Image (tube, rainbow, N blue to C red):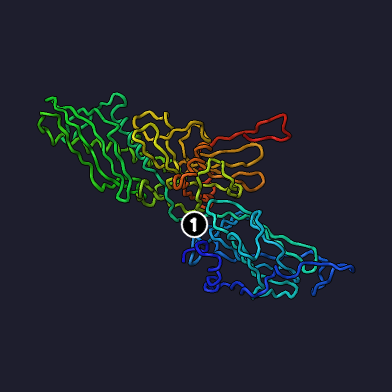
Amino acid sequence: MRSLRRLTALLLLPLAFGCGQEGLPENEAESLSARADPFTTSRGTVQNACGNADTTPQIFSNTLMSPAALHIGGGAPANWNPESGRMSRGGIEYVSANGLRFELVTDKCTYIREVKVGSRVVTPTYTDGYWYSAQDSSYQPADPSRYGYNLWIFFPYLGDGSTNQVTITVGRTFGSGTATYSFPMVQVDSVEANSVPAPIGFSRAELWNMFGKALFTKFNGATNSTVIRSSDGSMRRIYGYDPNSLQLSVTSNGVGFSFKFKTDLDNWCDPTIRAYGTFKLNANSSGISVQWVNAPQASLEWPLRCVAVQVVPILGLVPTLIYDIIESEAANSMTSTIESSIIDSLPETTNVQLFLDGSTTRSNELLVNLKLPAPSIKLNVPYDAFDMNRSATLFPSGENLTLLASGLGVNDYVAGVSPQTTLYSGPNGVPRYGSTTWPNAQTLSRATNPVWNGLPIARLLARMSPTVLSTSTYQYTPGCTFKANNMLGRASVRFGVNDTVTDAQRLRGIFGAAPGYSLRVVFLNDLSTSIADNASRCGVTTYGPIYDPGLPVLANP
C-alpha cells in the first residue's frame, strides 16, 4: 500500500485503524457538524450547557497529526512514505497525501461550522473527492474547560504544486460567534527527505542536436573536411560527413548512434565509413565519463571497381573520431556538454562532483542523478504556457530553490523534414526552427513568439510575481537556483513552459502529446545559506510595470 492518495476515500477508514491512528467515526455516529446550529427565541439567544453562548469560541491548538512530516533539517521519520507525507516551511504545508488529520482543541460547547479547501466548501458527504469527518477526541485535555476533536479532511490528489488555503471554522453551540484556523497547503507529488537522488533528463532530440553540432564542428563546418591522427600514428584527412546519415536512439540499453563520412586514399578509391556504437554514462565523484556498451566500430563501403585496401589504418580513424565527438574534454563533445550543463549550475563546494549519483537511460531519455543534502518536493508540471487556470506554488520568501527536472514534456512534429516525424522534448527544450547553425537539427516550428522569445521551445520556466510592481520569469538549466522573494513574506511561483498559447492548447488537446515535466524543487538553504546564496542562478528576465493613464493602478504585461 503505497500512499493515501492511491486509495479511495472509503478505503482510508480501515487504513486509519490499521496504522494505529484514531479511527474515523462509524456511519451512524453523530458528526460534530451535525449538531444544532444557533437559534433564537423571542426572549433572545438560547443558552447552551456551558453557559457561554454569548462568547466567541476559542481555538487553543490545532495540531496536524497526519500524514507524517519530515523532521527539521529534512530528515525522514521511521516508515517514511514520500508519496503520503508533508513538510512544513514558513507556515506552509507541502502535502503529497490526499487527506489531513488534525487534533483540534477548543473551549467547550463548540462545533465544526465550516471546512473549506480553497474556495470549495467541504461537507461530511463525499463529493468529487472532497469530504470531512469530525468526532470527539479519545484523549481529552486535562483542563475541564477545554475539549478535543479529531478532524479528517479529504481532497482530490493534485501533484502540480497548486496552493489552496485550508480553513476550519468553529462555531459556538447556540451562539453566533466563530473562530477560524487557516493555513496554506501546497499539493505535491512527493515530499523527499534530504540526500534523495533526483534525475536530470536529456531527451533524444537534445542528444541528437549535441551529436550533430559536435560532428559539424569537428568537420570544420561548411568546409566539411579535417585532418586527424589514426591509431597507427599517421595523419589522414576525413571529409564528406553526411548530416542526413546521422541516426541516434535512446533505450534502456543505452545511447546508440551511427553516421557516415569519407577518408582520402592514394588510389582515388575513397571509402565511405559508417561509424557506430552504443554507450552509457557513469556519473560519480570523479565526474561524468563514458561506459561503452558496444565500443566504436566501423564498416566500409567501397566505390564501384575499387578493392578493399588499407583497411586497418582506415578503421583506426574511428576510435579517434568518436573519442573527439563523445568523450574528450573539448567544449563541443557530448560528455563535456552534458557535464558542464550540470556542474556549472550546481552550488559551489569543494568537490561538486560528490553530488553526482549515477546515470540511466530509458526510452528517448538519458538521466543523470543528483543527490543534494537538502529536502525537496516533486511537482508534476503541466504543459502550461501560463494560459491554464491553475494556482501558483507558494514558497517562503528567502528560500533558495534549486531545480532538477526530467521527463518528456511534449511530442510534436519536427520542423522541415520529410517524411514527417515527431520528437520528444525534455525540460531543456529544443531549438526553434531557423535558429540553428548546423544541418539536420531537430527543431520545432512556431508561427508566433513563445513566452520568452529566443529561448528553446518547450523549455521549463518559472514565473514569480514578488510584488505588484514586477514579474520575473526564470529559465531552467539543470541544477540552477533562484530565490523566492516577496516583501510580504511569501512568494507565488507558477511553473510552465516556453511555448505559444496556441500551440500549448493544441498539444494538450492531443492525447499523450503534452504530459509535462517532473520537477524536483530542492530547498537549498538547508545545505548552507551561504552556499545557497552563491549558487549559480537561473537566467531571468524581469518585466517592470506598464503605466496606463486610463487605469487607476499599475499593470504588468
Residue pictured at 75% horizontal, 65% vertical: 171
Q: Nearer the viewer, residue 68 or 499?
A: 499
* Mark count: 1
Residue 493 percent coordinates (x, y): 58, 45
Dot 1 falls on a residue whose secondary structure is strand
Residue 514 percent coordinates (x, y): 46, 45
Q: Quadrant of residue 296?
A: top left
Q: Nearer the viewer, residue 463 or 152?
A: 152
Can the viewer see residue 235 in this picture? yes
Instruction: Classify residue 36 as left or right of residue 336.
Output: right
Residue 232 percent coordinates (x, y): 15, 35
Residue 137 percent coordinates (x, y): 65, 73
Instruction: Classify residue 101 as left or right of residue 170.
Output: left
Instruction: Classify residue 146 as left or right of residue 400.
Output: right
Q: Quadrant of residue 175?
A: bottom right
Instruction: Classify residue 387 as left or right of residue 40.
Output: left
Q: Residue furthest right?
A: 43
Name the kind of residue labelled 1 in the image: Glu
Image quadrant containing the C terminus: top right
Residue count near mark 1 (Cα–Cα under 10 Å), binned few <14, some 14–19, many ≥20: many
Residue pictured at 18% horizontal, 38% vertical: 299
Can the viewer see residue 527 in this picture? no
Residue under numbered circle 1: 192
